Amino acid sequence: MSGLAPTKPNDAFEALPEALSELIGRVIRGTRLWPSEKRDVRAELESHFREGLIELTQEGLTVAESVEVLRDGFGDPETAAILIRRGKKRGRSMLWKITISAAMVLFSVVGAGAGYFAYVQFGQPNPTVDYVAQINEPVRQTPEADRAWPLYHEIIQAMDLMPALAAARQSMPRATDAGWQEVLPWLTANRRLVSRILDAAQKPVFGYVYGHDSAREYLIRRALAVGEAGTPEEAAARIDQEGDPLMPPTISLLLPHLTDMRDLGRLLVLSAREHLSHGDFEEAWGELDACHRMGVQLLGGQTLVEQLVGVSIARMATEEMRRTLSEQHAALNPGQIKVLSGSHVLVVAPETYRANLAGERFFFHDCVQYLFTDDGAGSGRLIPSQYDKLRWMGQSASPTQSDSALGAIGKDAELLAIATAHADRRETLEKHQEMWERMNELLALPLYDSRRAEADRMIERETGGSKGRRFALIALLLPSLSTADRTFREAAMEHVATQAVIAMVQYRAAHAAWPERLDDLSPEYLRQVPVDAYTGIYLRYGLTEAGVPLLYSVGRDMQDDGGSTELVESGGGRPQTRDIVYWPTSN
């Protein structure tokens, strides 16, 4: 024993040996207490070891031996830290424990919410299927020589797009109308193209390839023609702006050619009217026949909008054919009657007017693969930002309350709510398939079947109310096909009515009298008597007291009003005649 024992034990060993200081440090680090609590624990441990050193050294041990005894007797510092931490926590006040527990719960909830928000908000799609290529596949398999679009493309490039036509698109004046002089310069400038249009109309298929590189030069020409750009360079810069790489390509498809195809149809009709004003029936009828062929070409398109434009052009032709025959039938000679026998409209089956909805299916599936994540097993979740892009395209771009900061917060909350409640990718596709099949079953029913109305109600029932968020994407994208289907069926009925009108004129030329009944036309002049799509029986036909034929459908109200052309509200935005009268035509 070296030296005398200290007279003041508490003042001895003010600087503890390094081994004990290190042991205290390991204990303090393991307690994970508040700083003030760590200071208290350190003071207690230091006091404990000082007293131990004093006692052991007074018993005759050296300082080194005393340190060894104290360190071995203390045990594992990590275990000691755990015991000290538990003891301190048990000694805290109830208020402190409640506060800490509430804070931990709040922290957990906020953390979980933030984590889930990030999980939902920042997902990325992983598209794997090129649906544009699938839309184009039937055209790609068609030989280039059978496609009409390359010829139409050249014709449109050479066509003079004069503003005069814009005013005539609705009125379509006749040679005897006051507005004829407004469209005559445009007609004269483009008359050189008519023969080329007739050649293009002879092709079996329209053959437009969506997203093709040649569309760029076409869009540049259109931008220059309508004044959207002053130079080709400006037009190219507008067109070549980078789009969002995470937008479905099927949404980005541009269809400006459809407007120009309508104008080609109008050019043929106006040219036919000019030929008739000079007494050239054969040339006029050939141009109307070509207009009808053009519409039928578009009817075979891969997208619903292209097919509907085809319906519009075909109806433009058949309406003008009936009007022409109404005005010219009494003066037609045998040679002109023979021309009618070779009409394209006579060989086209009414079943041609049927929508091919494959493109609509591709469109939905393409949107799904860009709006949902992909877990590799066919499922995934809706991405709010992606869904918002799609929804924005269908909304007005005008400023609204949602543009304010509060509105933006509300919109984000709404999108998050939709995303968290929305069905996953697999269930969304399954529900879409289920509704699609059911809708097509209903639309296969005749127009007069009351069950067809279920097609529109089904969308609201399956995607509205409490299901509005769960199937929000289907509600946004699934079209009401009943209107389009009715358009196709009315066009098919107009088509067969035009066939009947041609047969009526041929019968009159042969018999010097109109047929008493439509049955008199079949089978020599007409393959089969046309059926009214709104009744399921033959179109209404009869001779008036003046001996003039009257051919009509009972129309959408399914009531026979004797061939009335009185306009009534149809509920579709535009007035309709009570009956659809095909003969005589209105001028």
Image (cartoon, rainbow, N blue to C red):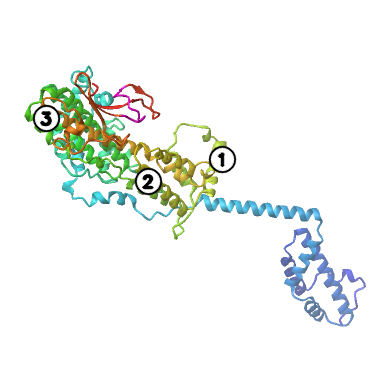
Residue 409: mark = 1
> Residue flagged by tag 1: what amino acid is it?
Ile
Q: Mark 2 points at which residue?
A: 441
- Residue 76 % position (x, y): 74, 75
Q: Does the magenta stretch include residue 562?
A: yes
Q: Is mark 2 on a helix, strand or loop?
A: helix
> Residue flagged by tag 2: what amino acid is it?
Glu
Is 372 on the left or on the right of 53, as rendered? left
- Residue 535 % position (x, y): 32, 34
Nearer mark to the viewer, of 2 and 1: 2
- Visible residue check, residue 357: yes
Q: Residue furthest top?
A: 178
Q: Is mark 3 on a helix, strand or loop?
A: helix
Circle 3 crowding by C-alpha within 10 Å: few under 14, some 14–19, many from 20:
some
Distance of mark 3 from mark 1, alpha carbons? Answer: 65 Å
Magenta residue span: 554-565
Distance of mark 2 from mark 3, alpha carbons? Answer: 44 Å
* Dominant secondary-structure state across the stretch colored magenta: loop
Is 234 on the left or on the right of 101, as rendered? left
In the depicted structure, whether residue 498 falls above or below residue 114: above
Is 34 on the left or on the right of 111, as rendered? right
Closer to us: 439 or 12: 439
Q: Mark 3 points at which residue?
A: 283
How many numbered marks does the figure carry?
3
Indicate which disc, 2 or 3, sits on the residue closer to the N terminus: 3
Closer to us: 430 or 81: 430
- Residue 475 % position (x, y): 45, 42
Q: Does the magenta stretch include residue 382?
A: no
